[in-house]
Amino acid sequence: MKILVTGGAGFIGSALTRYIIRETTDSVVNVDKLTYAGNLASLTGISSSGRYAFEQVDICNRIELDRVFQQHRPEAIMHLAAESHVDRSIEGPAAFIETNIVGTYTLLEAARHYWQTLGEPTKTSFRFHHISTDEVYGDLDNPSELFTETTPYAPSSPYSASKASSDHLVRAWRRTYGLPTIITNCSNNYGPYHFPEKLIPLTILNALEGKPLPVYGKGNQVRDWLYVEDHARALYHVMTQAVEGEIYNIGGHNEKQNLEVVHTICALLEELAPNKPDGVKQYCDLITFVADRPGHDLRYAIDASKIQRELGWSPEETFESGMRKTVQWYLENPEWVAQIKSGAYMQWIDKNYGSRATTA
């Protein structure tokens, strides 16, 4: 099968692309605009494969999308291209509206018109797999409650609202036009090749440089953490096994408070990187509580029983094993980190965290 993956140079997209090329006989056409978070260095291990092709294309560009469809003739789409950082969406929501809503609309239309030209059995087996987030559900008040596939949408941030909008567009294109779609909503991913604006890589890299480890509010926000390679495997399961029209939640069964995550990283660094920066006695001494971001959801937690029951998927990594692999990867790949941390990245970190008042 030839699969068109949008956002294949991003964090989750690159993990998925590596999985498909290394673990299956399928081909990948990677369509990526290469924004700040897209990095072809995350694909160096598979980019020379004859089953891999790259197209630097913006999903908002209909003409280029039509060309890609006609040139490569994919049999399935896995749509991951998205602006995904909540803090950036608060600072500048326009890019999230453009990519996540307008881009998804444009891709759906290009896919629909291409799909309508297909002959059987390719037309029947064709799938448009939309990869979304658990943040579309808002947050949970009841400590025993979990997000299910029927939880009502209640997004809190410009990011999650834009992803909720894209989910609704995918549902509408199936209902109105018959386009065979699948939707998955995942919990927080972590692992190798993660752009270092997110909590886990930011904490690892700041600690190694002796910089403050910023924690929003009290650090009591709860997330369900999913190792990215487990997620890639789940996505392929869904693409190849799910009935069209289905929706699956994908979670790691690892609910942790943000502060607990930071302490876990500090403990691993004490073991794996004992030679600390000058003036640092313990990595956890660098923890700095800063003003919370607006509209910050308190708790996300996924019920992933449906995908386990129907498709036989469950995560292989525990939080402890996945976190150890993640920290070790960043320690062993300083060249990738150095390439990513450009001047634009540092300007964003200073802008987002530099002006936040400390709270403790």
Image (spheres, rainbow, N blue to C red):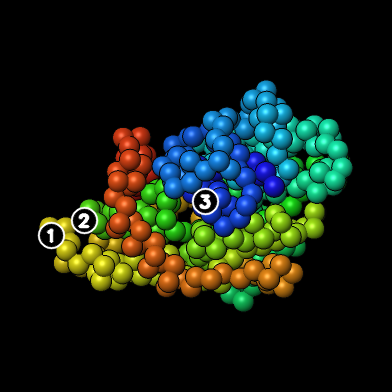
**Number of marks in picture:** 3
Q: How far apart are marks 2 and 3 (CA)?
A: 33 Å
The residue mark sitting in front, 3 or 1, is: 3
Where does residue 213 sit, x and y in percent of width and height?
30, 57
**Of the image marks 2 and 1, the number of the one nearer the N terminus:** 2
The residue mark sitting in front, 2 or 3, is: 3
Q: Mark 1 points at which residue?
A: 279
SS state under label 1? loop
**Of the image marks 3 and 1, the number of the one nearer the N terminus:** 3
Q: Residue furthest front?
A: 50
Q: Which residue lies furthest to the left in this view?
A: 278
SS state under label 2? loop
- In the rendered view, does 255 fall on the left or right side of 339? right
Q: Is residue 347 above or below residue 291?
A: above
Where does residue 62 sit, x and y in percent of width and height?
68, 26
**Of the image marks 2 and 3, the number of the one nearer the N terminus:** 3
| Badge 1 amino acid | Gly
Q: Distance between the residues labelled 3 and 1?
A: 40 Å
SS state under label 3? helix
Q: Mark 2 points at which residue?
A: 210
Q: Is residue 254 above or below residue 152?
A: below
| Badge 3 amino acid | Arg
**How busy is the neighbourhood of tag 1: few (under 14 within 10 Å), some, or many (20 plus)?**
few
Q: Distance between the residues labelled 2 and 1?
A: 8 Å
Asked whether the residues under the numbered discs 3 and 1 touch, taking CB atoms below 8 Å apart as contact, a structural biologist would say no
Q: Mark 3 points at which residue?
A: 18
